[in-house]
Amino acid sequence: MIYIGELIYSSEVKALFFLLKAGIRCSLATCHGETPELMIKRWTIEDNISITSIEDIDIIIQISIVEDICKKIRRV
């Protein structure tokens, strides 16, 4: 398994999509964004990643934090 870590800089984003393009399907990376749609928009606009490359992603998991009365709850 290839673990990239957090995708902060354009070079890291491009490394992830290079691995996917090379056929390495067992990669794992994390990133922060308001929604998956906004992350994809950022990758296409700021990092110049094509939509066809983004379609190589098999799954995106979104975790949200819900404010409860006395604690924060994370939801997948």
Image (spheres, grey):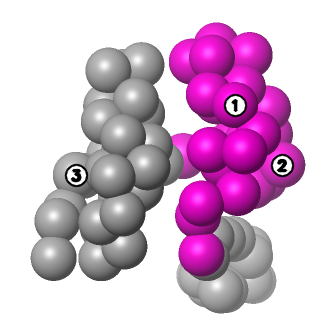
x and y percentages locating residue 61 in the rendered image? 61, 75
Label at residue 37:
2
User: Mark 3 packing: few (<14 Cα in 10 Å), some, or many (20+)?
Assistant: some
Where 64 sits versus 20, above or below? Answer: below
The answer to whether marks 3 and 2 mark residues whose Cβ atoms lie closer than 8 Å is: no
x and y percentages locating residue 10 in the rendered image? 42, 19
Q: Amino acid at mark 1?
A: Ser
Specify the quadrant that holds the N terminus. bottom left
- Looking at the image, which residue sits at the far front? 22
Disc on the earlier residue, 1 or 2: 2
User: Mark 1 packing: few (<14 Cα in 10 Å), some, or many (20+)?
Assistant: few
Query: Which residues are drawn in magenta?
Result: 32-58
x and y percentages locating residue 58 in the rendered image? 59, 75
Q: Nearer the viewer, residue 64 or 23?
A: 23
Disc on the earlier residue, 3 or 2: 3
x and y percentages locating residue 65 in the rendered image? 66, 71
Is 46 magenta? The answer is: yes
Task: Look at the numbered disc 3 and give the secondary structure of its residue.
Answer: strand
Residue highlighted by disc 1: 50
How far separated are the C-alphas under marks 3 and 2?
21 Å
Residue highlighted by disc 3: 4
How far separated are the C-alphas under marks 1 and 2?
14 Å
